[in-house]
Image (tube, grey):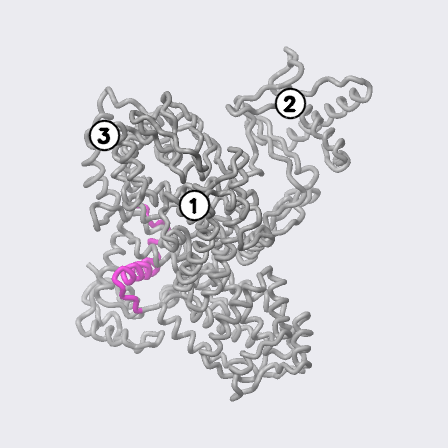
Amino acid sequence: MPPKPPRKGGAAAKGQRASPDRGTGGTPPPAAARLEFGETDFVALCDTLRVSDTVRANAWKTYEKVSSADGTLVGYSEKKKDLWGICIFIAAVDLDEMTFTFTELLKSIGMSVCTCFRLLREMDVNMDTISTKVDSNVSRLNKKYDVLSALYHKFERTCGLIYIIQPSSQTSAELSFPLVLKTSWITFLLAKGKVLQMEDDLVISFQLLLCVLDYFIKLSPPAMLKEPYKSHVSAMSINGSTRAPRRGQNRSTRTSKQTDTDTKVIEVLCKEYGCNLDEVKNVYFTSFIPFLNSVGIVTSNGLPEVEDLSRQYEELYLKNKDIDARLFLDNDETLQRNHIECLQLERTPRKNNPDEELNLILPQTPVRAAMNTIQQLMMILNSASDKPSDNLISYFNNCTVNPKESILARVENLGNIFKEKFAEAVGQGCAEIGSQRYKLGVRLYYRVMESMLKSEEERLSVHNFSKLLNNNIFHTSLLACAVEVVMATYGRNASQSDGTSTETDLSFPWILNVLDLKAFDFYKVIESFIKAEPSLTREMIKHLERCEHRIMESLAWQSDSSLFDLIKQSKEREGQVDQPEPTCSLNFPLQHNHTAADLYLSPVRSPKKKGSTALNPIPIIDAQPVLAPQTQKPQKSTSLSLFYKKVYRLAYLRLNTLCLRLLFDHPELEHLIWTLFQHTLQNEYELMKDRHLDQIMMCSMYGICKVKNVDLRFKIIVTAYKELTNTNQETFKRVLIREGQYDSIIVFYNLVFMQKLKTNILQYASNRPPTLSPIPHIPRSPYKFSNSPLRVPAGSNIYISPLKSPYKFSEGMLSPTKMTPRSRILVSIGESFGTSEKFQKINQMVGSSDRQLKRSAEVSTAPKPLKRLRFDIEGQDEADGSKHLPGESKFQQKLAEMTSTRTRMQKQKLNDGTDTSATEEK
């Protein structure tokens, strides 16, 4: 039972909650005198945070649950106050009774924000400890903290480059660098809170920060500024653009007078930090100036009064009940990252050997990484147009029905919808920002469309694409994919140091809802889009691949999806129960030769022998109709077949990863689990409706382990599942039971999954289990990355890395890579990388062989044919040229092949006029 205060205590607490102050609002009676039973400090903490009796009771219940869990919170048994605070937070969020801010909570228990987030993750060992509502709230706080932390550290460093910390006596004694720093930061926090509804948008927030810096640079005396800002502000004064009015002068007049000279400062800031000038100007005039006009700033000593700004921000902070970002100015311990995390973020990589050159790319700040990603997108699209090119117009004119007018009308109509929805999500003042991003998407849309049509023209030797270009769903999907690339580029979050995706309000599938597009239709264009645009960054390719995975996992299985109609048609074909994809084809290589035209025009597969993957020509052009016999059998949808093949492969990869974590002592169970999993997807596909692929996977794993008497509980399964990449706790915490009712995955297994598949599951307990499904053939990703090392087939443990350019394009511009002549070609032979001595011996052998080959080439007029490793589509390799000597070991054979291959490459470079032999160490 929780500690309970007497009734008068409840009334006192209620009176305290009515206080708008950040403190307790009064001095409560001594906690010990108000207790009937329980922990004195817990009641005192509840009083400090002004929580209700209901929150108090729920918090204590949660505390008892987590503190009694075996081995749950190692290291926190003596820190009861920390656990109490977290439990109070959980209860308050669940009950919608937040009487305190997140910062107040951290202050009251003396905990940092990072420690709090980590403790919340550790507490969530049971599926019912922390609700999805709390998960969502914590995720929002975490993203906001990441953005604020990244922006403050960028702001602090930037101000150090703009202002003189100890200015000369020419400046006012009351005007100091700390005051400018404080006033600027609080102004930014207030502007961010007023302008942006979506506060985790790092890019718009940084652009707004640049506007604030521009504003305060112009207000500052030149003597406080460093170059080049000092010169620009001085020029403004000379040209008659006054620096700042004093108290009582109309401020709105000066902010509305923007001359060409006034933009010089913002131009310098944009150039310095890699921001698009037009975008920042848009934020300045459509968002920042209206903000200044609305808040009624009162100036003092040339700057806005910090107390007035702080008071207005206080109101926002108390309303949102989250993080008081003013505390960054004080280096408050509640906002400090853990020491180890800071070291990993800020340290410069050290050389292992002082004689070797640095071969590591230094970590980028989140802001710099975001700006570089945007710069690269701009470099791709700068030469593109937001109107159809002449080549596209030519394709349009060749169509039986010219699609030009409908395409232009669709782009304009969807653009208006996008602009409106973007403003609703981000802020009404940001509508033009949304319009700018949409126009970038349109440029990419036309660019990729032209590339696709060229490929189809080469593939089919036709020019009339009337059916495809008049297909509304194709165009909407292609446009959505292009806009998604732009949105993901700009939506890079402050926590994305590895380039992976994190959820924001504008994250996929937001674009599908905006454009009213079904996920299954969007899926059809992804692979062709990636192949048609070779300039996409690795991060964008990974993002689109993740979008494809999300569609296969859950989005395509929503109840209103066209996927279920296709499956139904497939099963009703010829009046018999059919399979969406025969299991016998699972172990065949997945052919990635389907185009978007194949999938959008309802392509069909020839009804040949089982396992055949031959395709009929796709009717993407207008032709004379051919009368088919009435007795011709309906043909199978290629889009459905390809979809199921991809789903099976994704499903098995996820299952295999989970089995390696949980069932390494029982490897024989993986095939049984896969058979049940695949059977469910194929024959009980209705179980996937409005559910997630991983829910079926975990239930299949639990069911097989249950009948095989292997002790594997759902608690262990979901704990391992949370460690997988791209997983969401809602997957196992909130599963559809029946219409409108959701519960945990355990309830789903008992009430739905087991009831549907009980007979099938029990078959695995017998001595004659069902026929096992083939293991899917797992190829490399169809979205190939050029920098990935390739493994030499036929069981050899040799990896070849593609020749790297001395320049890289991954950060938006060509810049030298951190590679030395030694590190440009690395070879690994054997079971492990081994010691440096082994590499020295290998290098000596390779160098010696090269010299011998060169000498023999000089003496002999007819050099021996060079051996060449050849890789075919089946993954086999064979050597051309003379046979190996019978006495050679396998290692010597491989080394000889590699030596001759390397020599041939060097000779080819010499023939091309590129002499690299002088710069590469052997």
Left or right for 906, reference 438? right
Q: Is residue 869 magenta?
A: no
Q: Secondary structure at mark 1?
A: loop
Q: Which residue is mark 3?
A: 761
Q: Nearer the viewer, mark 1 or mark 2?
A: 1
Q: Which residue is mark 1?
A: 470
Residue 364 appears in the figure: no
Residue type indicated by callout 1:
Asn
Q: Residues within 10 Å of mark 3 (few under 14, many from 20)?
A: many
Q: Residues within 10 Å of mark 1 (few under 14, many from 20)?
A: some
Kindly identify the residue that appears in the image at 61 percent across and 46 percent down.
360
214 lies above or below 245: above
Residue type indicated by callout 2:
Arg
Quarter of the rendering occupied by the N terminus: bottom left
Kindly identify the residue that appears in the image at 41 percent across and 38 percent down.
599
Give the residue at the far left of this rendering.
7
Of residues 373 and 304, the one nearer the viewer is 373
Residue 664: percent from left, percent from top: 37, 30
Q: Which residue is mark 2?
A: 868
Q: Earlier in the sequence, mark 2 or mark 3?
A: 3
**Span colored in magenta:** 70-99
Residue 839: percent from left, percent from top: 65, 30
Alpha-carbon distance for marks 2 and 3?
52 Å
Give the residue at the far front of this rendering.
624
Residues tagged 1 and 3 counted as in contact (Cβ below 8 A): no
Residue 380: percent from left, percent from top: 58, 50
Residues tagged 2 and 3 counted as in contact (Cβ below 8 A): no
